[in-house]
Image (cartoon, helix red, strand yellow):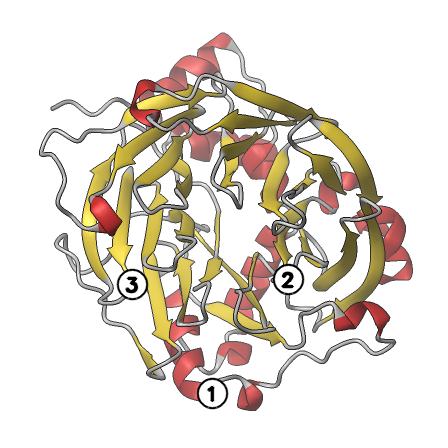
Amino acid sequence: MEDTAVEEAEVSGAAEFAPALIAAHPHGNSVAVAIGPELRVFDLKAGSPVLLSHDRGSRSHSDAIRAICFSLSGALFASAGDDKLVKVWKTDSWRCIRTITSEKRVSAVAISNDDLYVTFADKFGVVWLVTLGEDGTEQVSVDNKPVSILGHYCSIITSMKFSPDGRFIATADRDFKIRVTLFPKNPLKGAHEIQSFCLGHTDFVSCIAFTSMSENQSFLISGGGDSTVRLWDYINGCLLDTCQVRDKMGELLEPNETDDSSLAIADICLSNDGSLVAVAIQSFNGVMLLACDVVEKKLSFLKVITMEKSYIPTSLASNFSSELLWIVMGASNMPNQASSQLLTRLRIIPCFQKDLISSDNSPAVLEDSAIPHGEKLLLALQGSLDIAKQEEVLASVLAALKVSMHKMLVKKHYSEERREQRKRGRNDKKIKN
């Protein structure tokens, strides 16, 4: 009965569950949270919430935001989602300098290391590129429309990242694969040279991240629906090591949460030197920490940091200039959810650095009173200071999070009649000029 209800909701064009996202400025200037169509930014230097400057309505987006990122320099920020808009922001003023319209809903976004290009992936697996002005300014050609540069052939791209040296762009999808493509000097002509495929996941790949450069080399780390975190030599497409998350959880799991579908990797985040990997897991109330040894090319289990039962992280972030791991929980596009219920719950773990590898003590999650800028930051990013009192909202979010990844990314099989019904009700039809 539940599957039937889900299918009927899809046919009627109902929106899909959307997890809350978090991103941290690489130099610690600000932190951004996306929940539903809302983009919330807090200026950590000024100690105050940011008033976004944009030209379309009272919100930055009109539908759920699916992807956010800062550029490597921190000068630019991009947001994109189900309203088929990609927005590029200057972070010194938080003014929107570009609004790009996609033909289909957007699932991933990234900014090139030189701040000259923004790339985004639509739900049909096509990666598009738009040229930004010199140094990220808005001085661009009026006919600067998105150009398709590569594709994953009708497979949703779940994550997209540029390598630390900017030479490659990595894209992961729900069909178990990671593609590493050489990013050309003139990408407007397309990115056709494939460096490698990283193949080994047995379910969708949900997230990828590059380690920092060490002796002119970096590595790729991925997480997926098969409950594994994997370390790759992405230049040659070689799998170096695999960490089976399920085997490390032991007694921390309920009996009904031990299968891979309950332990999909929701997000991964690396410490600034790449020696630590924080892992968010779909139905687990906490974060797993792995040690990443780039010399031995191994991943090893370090420790688990548990939180209250009602807290399941949906997104993780860190930056180069601090040792804080930013964690957010939240969701939108759930049945009967009012805009006033677009609440998130923020957590911070300090000392997210390699010293943890040799420490026997787990870092304590900061109390709200110890969080930088305290109530002012929490109110700006969470939407409320009394999250714990919103029991009904938290319960519905918690229930959704425990099955969210698989409902979003595992392919569904329909009859021909059902396919036609879905086509008529879908929200990804080509926009007519």
Q: Which residue is mark 1?
A: 374
Label 1: element kind? helix
Q: In this rendering, is residue 364 above or below 157?
A: below
Mark nearest the camera among 1 and 2 is: 2
The residue sitting at 71% across, 62% down in the picture is 287
Answer yes or no: do the residues labelled 1 and 2 have beta carbons within 8 Å?
A: no
Q: Residue furthest bottom?
A: 369
Label 2 and label 3: CA atoms lie apart by 23 Å
Q: Is residue 191 left or right of residue 75?
A: right
Front-most of residues 410 and 238 = 238
Task: State the quadrant of the C terminus.
Answer: top left
Q: Earlier in the sequence, mark 1 or mark 3?
A: 3
Q: Earlier in the sequence, mark 1 or mark 2?
A: 2
Mark nearest the camera among 1 and 3 is: 3
Front-most of residues 200 and 260 = 200
Kindly identify the amino acid type of the residue bearing the numbered disc 3: Thr
Quarter location, residue 76: bottom left
Crowd around label 2: few <14 · some 14–19 · many ≥20 (10 Å): many
Q: Which residue is mark 3?
A: 91
Q: Earlier in the sequence, mark 2 or mark 3?
A: 3
Label 1 and label 3: CA atoms lie apart by 22 Å
* Residue 136 horizontal/vertical position (percent): 25, 50
Q: Which residue is mark 2?
A: 271
